[in-house]
Image (cartoon, rainbow, N blue to C red):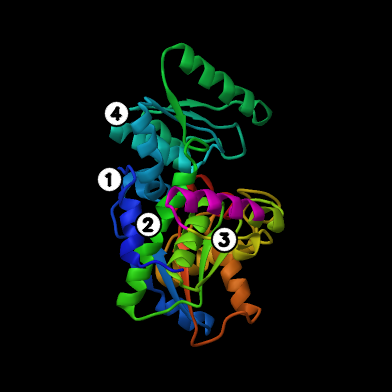
Amino acid sequence: MAITREQLRERLGGLPRLQLAALPTPMEKLERLSAHVGGPDFWVKREDLTGVAMGGNKIREFEYQIAQAVERGCDVLLHAAAAQSNQSRQTAAVAAKLGLKAVMVGRRDAHATDQGNLLLTRLFGAEVHLPEVEEQSAAVAAKIEELARAGHKPFNTSSDARVFRAVAYVDGALELVAQCADAGIEPDAIYLCSGAYTHVGLVVALRALGIDWRVVGISPSPRDDVAAAEGHADLAAECAGVLGLELALAAGDFESYAGFVGPDYGVVTDESRAALELLAQQEGLLLDPSYTSKAMAGMLSHVRDGWWQKGQTLIFLHTGGTPALFAYAEDLGY
């Protein structure tokens, strides 16, 4: 049985939460893009404008996830990913804002240059390590052990209390539903770059509210779509459990596609470059090279393939990541 927005908001209100993001983020109509494509009406939900550290969806997620770190008395926020990781940048900034130590264990990959996200991570005062790619996992484990021996209590923003990142986008979905009502629109689909948490939170919220909007994820990394959907369903069950929601979500409730990744994560494709340039030149809207440009390429490909027609409405959830552009000039041909 569906619950009301007020009831869902009450359940969220019982959880620890930090006030980090500039909310609500705007929702804007992309009129020039719609005219250029000659297809559906496009809107964008600006999760790139969450405020802290040049924004991004992780800032919203951290309101609930890092609240758990504060509750546990953790004094170090740690993250490990690519050298140009958006989450590392946002982890370092939130640590600075909360007066905590930040540690980034990146990797010496093709974009390990002190520009973009890596520059900002250093600027926020994080302790940065860049081991070789094959040594990264061991370096993370060793750093966590070292911190514990020194009396610190580290919190890994990749894995610790991870379900609360999905919970945060239950809250984000409430915001989006209200904005759609104010704008007088009912989207035929919501597109986003889908790792897991943002996607899962949206679906959990919409199903809890009895709203049958299609959520289409475009993966930034190579993966099996069926296995990904099964993982999303497991995470959704955990998220629903945190909120006391009686939902029976299965893999079939999650739609995502890894066909737009290209050769690998973080590698610019012809399609992602074209999407990035199109949005910049038609709307003055910046996407990023690893995530949102590939998600936009996927959405535009689906429009070209006849999935969506003129008169329908699509919302693109812009998850951020634009600082990485400054480390990708050569990859983009500039």
Using the numbered discs, state the Cα–Cα distance from disc 3 to disc 1 in whole angstroms.
31 Å
Q: Position of residue 17 (x, y in %)?
A: 32, 44
Please report the bounds of the magenta region as a residue range.
230-245
Using the numbered discs, state the Cα–Cα distance from disc 2 to disc 4 in whole angstroms.
26 Å
Q: Which residue is mark 1?
A: 19
Q: Is residue 277 magenta?
A: no
Q: Which secondary structure lies at badge 3?
A: loop
Q: Which residue is mark 2?
A: 171
> Main SS of the magenta segment?
helix
Using the numbered discs, state the Cα–Cα distance from disc 3 to disc 2 in whole angstroms.
20 Å
The amino acid pointed to by label 2 is Asp
Position of residue 171 in the picture relative to residue 134 (left or right) = left
Earlier in the chain: of badge 4 and badge 1, it is 1
Q: Which secondary structure lies at badge 1?
A: loop
Q: Quadrant of the image for the C terminus? A: bottom right
Using the numbered discs, state the Cα–Cα distance from disc 4 to disc 3 in whole angstroms.
40 Å
Residue 123 in the image: above or below residue 34? above
Q: Which mark is residue 248?
A: 3
